[in-house]
Amino acid sequence: MNYLSELNKTQQEAVQYKDGPQLVIAGAGSGKTRVLTYKIAYLLQQGVSSGNILALTFTNKAAREMRERIMQLVDPKQTRYLTMGTFHSVCARILRQEAELLGFTSKFTIYDTSDSKGLVKRIVKEKGLDDKLYKSGVILNRISDAKNHLIDPIGYANNRHYMQLDRMNRLYEIPSIYAAYQQQLRQSNAMDFDDLLMNMNILLQQNKEVRQKYQEIFQYVLVDEYQDTNYSQYLIVKTLAEPQNNICVVGDDAQAIYSFRGANIQNILKFQQGYTNAQLFKLEQNYRSTQNIVNAANSLIAHNVGQIHKQVFSEKEPGQPLQLTAYPTDLEESAGVAKRIALLHKNKRSYEDIAVLYRTNAQSRTLENEFRKAGIPYRIYGGTSFYQRKEIKDAIAYFRLVVNPYDVEALLRIINFPARGIGNTTLKKLTDFAYTKQIHLIEVFHHLNDQQLSISSRTINQLNIFFQLIQSFVELSETLDAYQFAEHVLKTSGVLTSAAMDLSPEGIDRMQNLQELLNGIQEFVSKRKEEGIDFTPITDFLSEVSLLTDQDEKVDDHTPRITLMTVHAAKGLEFPITFIVGLEENLFPSPYCESESEMEEERRLLYVAITRSMELCHLTYSKQRFKNGSISYSSPSRFINDINPQFVQNTVSVQAPVNRWSNFSWGETSSFPSSPQPTKSPSATPTHRHLTRVPSNVRTSVGGEQTWKVGDRVFHKVFKEGTVKKVYSTNDSDKIDINFDEVGTKTLLLAFAKLEKR
């Protein structure tokens, strides 16, 4: 029992309590997993058989680590019959034993997401429905939500909430798709992941003998991360724990951030109402973070009404206050973060010690660009680099094919995206024909009526529509700049519409990424205009992307790297230093908040972000951000004011380079050698500009309307106020160097600077 001495007083009390229901509220970094682990060890040492203990977690990793730790605390033989695992794995184990009672065999198949999507697609096709409207991801999201609330197809069809949603989105056939989906699962002797929980509930509620059997087996029920449970999981736990109610749930209501997955915070908030004799234990000592970080997080979460109040404290050193920095634009924000990280690294901090957290995946683009330029190695945790994301690669494939019609990979990637009814059989016929005739795949479109191809008239029509679409894009690529062209392509092709129709969290994420791609292209075009280049074709942007993705492929996995991730992905992790970026209204909190409860969840999300920090936490926001192809003014997040200013230090933005394209030479050979180069582009060939010194005391801008001299105070609409440092000419333009108060020195073209004298 020596291990109990490793626990503080409250932890010991929570571990040793064993008679009746108990709620352990564990603040961030307070050692909740240790309490759960030691409690199981304590029960075993108190003579409770391992076969009578059920421990439920949310990840296999957590279950595995807990089991290994328990085996270090007690005789490993005592853990032999311990039932421990995720909700889904434990339910699957029980269902295999009792499958016949539900009309399945014990060898039933468990469908993964890919299997389920394939089945839904097949049902949609069989019913003759529009697969552009009835997208498998949207339908499965709806079915999953219903199952998590224990609603079957009949209940779904009679549910006012779901029916209203379906009418709003013109998805009138989801009830029949759900019914067909369940029917075909049963015919295939299969269950999906949600069925494992739903069928477990059906088994327990409808079969008294089975229910009593498992209630007798599991005399002690323990649940980790209880704040993340949905209704289905709640009911399983409640039923199995009866009638002894030796149930121990551990969690933190302040870290409940998964409502979009069906998690219900009320399960933990109302635990004591469901068990009136429940004992409450609050783990309030934080072992992770400095006092200032803990105090700042406490002051933030105090603004939530729906919570179990606790006062988390730390006995570590006070540490530095949270560092709050405002930047003029999102470009400066990313560059400023890169600059600060470079300084930290210069001061002997490992990149591994640092994480950058953001609200949406789309925000990684500007950060990745700046880190590449600064030579800062990074990893995307729980995700993919921006230009490697499927929807981005799909969009860029359209641009690639327009620029280079002989790009086979691009053609194959988008020929049926969005879905046009051009299947793999047709593609094989096209590629075989091209091989036989020794012609490029794109040239096959001129031979669609060839009898050797043997393609139906309907398919020929779809192929012709696609080919004509690409041809129209080719013509426009000569006259539209990169942004105008990209926007037109993504809208006309249906790529944006397809993404917008998917209202699932994953669908919203994809749409945000596509919008961010357009933002990046617009920034690219704007920057070149500032450099005096009037026309920027899509070919130039593609060259830039090819360089970026090439750098991605050269990353050494053994190199220490900083971590980039969403706040959701960061839960459960910790880092000595964190940067939380994009703290602006309509970004963090999310623009999709429609109720006070949703706003409280957003505040909990920031609480989670701050409490990942062990030593130092940087908060940043920008005053302007590119949105939907134009600059949008931003307001600081309301959550910043929720944090007690006593624990926050306002810092001056670090001078950071904002030229995102400085690593790109416009005269370099394109990665698309077959691409036509528009003659309109001034960047088609390298230019060598020779600087000519002019008198520094005075300079006349274009048209002679305004004179500038060194020392003049000026105002720029983006960079704000600054002081003129130098005025000079090149062989093709007039330039001015200005030291701006907020962002440092910038070189601007007088023709585009639009300066005002102060």
Image (tube, helix red, strand yellow):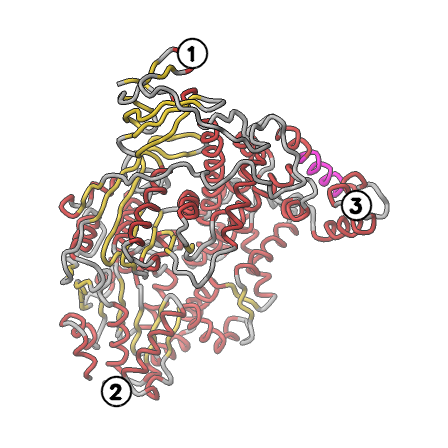
Identified by mark 3, the residue type is Ile
For label 1, the residue is 703
Residue 555 position, x and y percent, is 48, 56
Question: Which residue corresponds to the image point at 51% horizontal and 63% vertical from the top-left?
Answer: 192
For label 3, the residue is 439
Question: Which residue corresponds to the image point at 49% horizontal and 23% vertical from the top-left?
Answer: 731
Residue 465 position, x and y percent, is 70, 36
Q: Label 3 neighbourhood size at 10 Å, few (<14), some (14-19), many (20+)?
A: few
Identified by mark 1, the residue type is Gly
Q: Earlier in the sequence, mark 3 or mark 1?
A: 3
- Which mark is nearer the camera, 2 or 1? 1
User: Please, is residue 178 above or below residue 484 in the view?
Assistant: below
Q: Label 1 neighbourhood size at 10 Å, few (<14), some (14-19), many (20+)?
A: few
Residue 317 position, x and y percent, is 14, 59
Secondary element at image label 1:
helix
Question: Which residue corresponds to the image point at 35% horizontal and 38% vertical from the top-left?
Answer: 332
Q: Is residue 170 magenta?
A: no
- Which mark is nearer the camera, 3 or 1? 1
User: Please, is residue 309 above or below residue 673 in the view?
Assistant: below
**CA–CA distance between discs 3 and 1?**
56 Å
Q: Earlier in the sequence, mark 2 or mark 3?
A: 2
What's the magenta region? 458-470
For label 2, the residue is 47
